[in-house]
Image: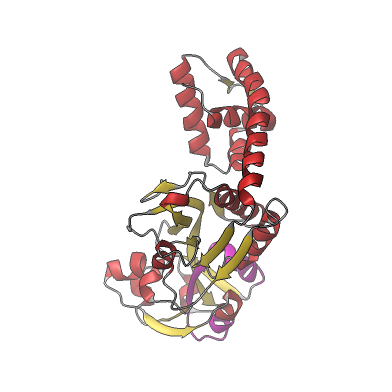
Amino acid sequence: MIVEIRHLRTIAAIAETGSFTRAAKRLHLTLSAVSHQVRELETLLGTVLVDRRKKPIGLTASGKRLLRCAERVLPEVRAAEAEVTEAQGRGARLYLALECHSCFDWLLPALDALRPAWPELDIDLKVGPRFDPLPALLGGEVDAVLGTDRGTQPGIAYAGVFRYEIVLVVPRGHALGSKRFIEPQDLAAEPLVTYPVDLERLDVVTRFLRPAGIEPVRGRTAELTSLLLQLVQSRRGVAALPRWAVADAAARGEVEIKRLGPSGLVSDLFLAVREAERGAPHLAAFLEVCRTVSVELLSDIEPCGDRLASGDPER
């Protein structure tokens, strides 16, 4: 079968929004993923589906034929998913391990959005500075992990939630504030204030400093992003944090943010679950609500749309 449900969803989103960009945002995919999907389908079917010359873009006669199919099929699929979800929702649990200390601002609204559809879902969070989440996931201690660690352990499936940039946060008037971007050597003597986790779990250390032969100077630690920002403001050190987590503080002039390297340090936030449970409806619903709420509440992120897949996720 050439035409899949994902194709119908894409055609419907393009027809409703009149834009590849807006369709990508609605589907929680990248713009390139939507464009590639349409081109792939047009090649397989041997016909043009989208009239790209129009503003807003529209569907050709062939595209409209697929749209009529989507209008019939997608409501049936949603209804079936809802029935299965409701049937399997009783007694389900979601014990979530959280590696992303900056995520609470959007995660708690996401959990609130999940509860109406899953009122009987047992939800709990586990966060700890010395907690190793992936072994706990494999051991059944937790059911999902939200973080940036893409381990190589067998038996774990991953899906991207969103992509974001890590920036360096410095006090106002700091010498590094005059630089266009930060080089690893700039941080050789700067105390790095961090969340209370091992340095090996920090992208700024493993992907920026140590490849350049720089061993960070470990400064003070704090559980909350707001406390880390206060440590930076009081000149106790510098911090590497998600741009979306510190953009407001920078806009208020409380701190300055600088790009790490000429192209920036980009990271992905993933949801990891046990391979055997990657098809569980409540986990799929949680992933979808995380993507939706994070896009609504955060700026400076790029949505992901890959499904839960074994091993290293599609980037």
When the figure is inspected, residue 217 is found, relative to residue 109, above or below; the finding is below
**Farthest left residue?**
213
Residue toward you, 191 or 136 = 136
Residue 273 colored in magenta in the image? no
Q: Is residue 315 visible?
A: no
When the figure is inspected, residue 284 is found, relative to residue 3, above or below; the finding is below
Left or right for 50, reference 41: right
What count of labels does the image hold?
Answer: 0
Q: Where does residue 305 sit, x and y in percent of width and height?
A: 52, 44
Q: Which residues are magenta?
A: 230-252
Q: Residue at x 66, y 41 (%)?
A: 82
Q: Is residue 159 visible?
A: yes
Which image quarter: residue 266?
bottom left
Q: Where does residue 286 sit, x and y in percent of width and height?
A: 59, 53
Which image quarter: residue 75?
top right
Q: Where does residue 277 sit, x and y in percent of width and height?
A: 47, 51
Residue toward you, 245 or 91 = 91
**Farthest right residue?**
116
What sort of colour scheme is used for the picture?
A: secondary structure
Q: Residue at x 63, y 25 (%)?
A: 73
When the figure is inspected, residue 13 is found, relative to residue 303, above or below; the finding is above
Q: Residue at x 55, y 30 (%)?
A: 5
Q: Where does residue 189 sit, x and y in percent of width and height?
A: 36, 82
When the figure is inspected, residue 25 is found, relative to residue 107, above or below; the finding is above
